Amino acid sequence: MLDVCLPGYRRQLKLHRYWVTHSGRTYRGLPKGSHGSTNPEIHVSHIRRLAAFFNIVACAERELGH
Amino acid sequence: MQPNSTVWPLLFSFRGPVMGQGFLAVVELRGRLLARQTEDGIILDGVNPGGFSCQAPTLDLANLDLRGTLLEILADVAFEAPTFDAFRQEVTRFFEETDAESVDEWQAAVDALRAARLAEPPEPLPRWPAELALEVRVIEKDLAGVAPTDNAGRPTLAAAA
């Protein structure tokens, strides 16, 4: 989804969380477990917030089929 | 992707210690959250700071998750910062980064709560004025200056009205 909706983004694993950076802004709250997590509730809530943070909600909804 | 939910505007205060690369700091935040009631519990979406979300079955447990989330993010910031000044700058940036849509949603929820168009939050909360100034303070400490009160307690949550 990010490859399509947030091209050029960078994802970095820190001590506790993934940081997603794009256009000089950084989302710092993505837990390690939610990337490829088997828990869809945790996954969806974090991805929804990340999409809002980067203003890509409409694209994310298209890509994720919601 | 948007959950079918009721949304409350919250303010929160948080104080917690962070150990960095050769420095010790205490971070104090007074920020904004959107609390969303969903079928599965409560989601706390950051507004200031905007770059995180928490989820738990109840508001009380979501608050506990908020504490852990903030401490983890601040530890990550400390991990990246070579000096206290760099840490302070990055914490400030983390706190201020948000998105306009979430800010607008927070203000609309305040208006709805004031107009009694929104039910009370799911658990009793104090009321703080919505206009209360947001605040981020990063204080450098030395070992002689630390106190038990510098340990991180649960954030204080309040309904913004």
Image (spheres, coloured by chain):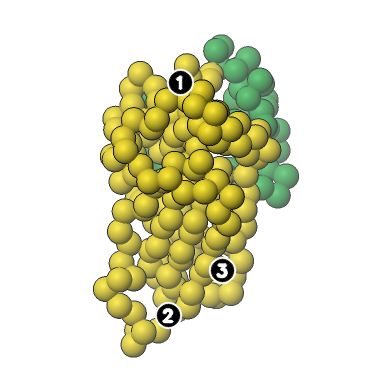
Chain colours: A green, B yellow
User: B63 or A47, which lies in front?
Assistant: B63
Q: Nearer the viewer, mark 2 or mark 1?
A: 1
Subunit that carries the residue with mark 2:
B
Q: Position of residue B105 (x, y in %)?
A: 60, 32
Whether label 3 touches label 2, CB < 8 Å:
no
Residue position for label 3: B88
Q: Which mark sits nearer the N-terminus, 2 or 1?
A: 1
Q: CA distance from mark 2 to mark 1?
A: 42 Å
Vertical position of residue A58 compared to residue B26: above or below: above
* Type of amino acid at the residue the image marks with label 2: Lys
Q: Residue at x 54, y 28 (%)?
A: B115
Residue position for label 2: B141
Q: Position of residue B108 (x, y in %)?
A: 60, 31
Q: Is residue B65 left or right of residue A7?
A: left
Q: Position of residue B73 (x, y in %)?
A: 45, 53
Q: CA distance from mark 3 to mark 2?
A: 13 Å
Whether label 2 touches label 1, CB < 8 Å:
no
Q: Is residue B34 left or right of residue A63?
A: left
Q: Is residue A10 visible?
A: no
Q: Residue at x 43, y 45 (%)?
A: B127
The disc placed on residue B119 is none
Whether label 3 touches label 1, CB < 8 Å:
no
* Type of amino acid at the residue the image marks with label 3: Arg
The disc placed on residue B5 is 1
Vertical position of residue B133 compared to residue A20: above or below: below
Task: Give the class, few, some or many, for how many residues have Cα within 10 Å of label 3's Cα (few <14, many ≥20).
Answer: many
Can you name the residue that lies furthest to the front here? B115
> Secondary structure beneath disc 3?
helix
User: B91 or A30, which lies in front?
Assistant: B91
Same-chain check, marks 3 and 2:
yes
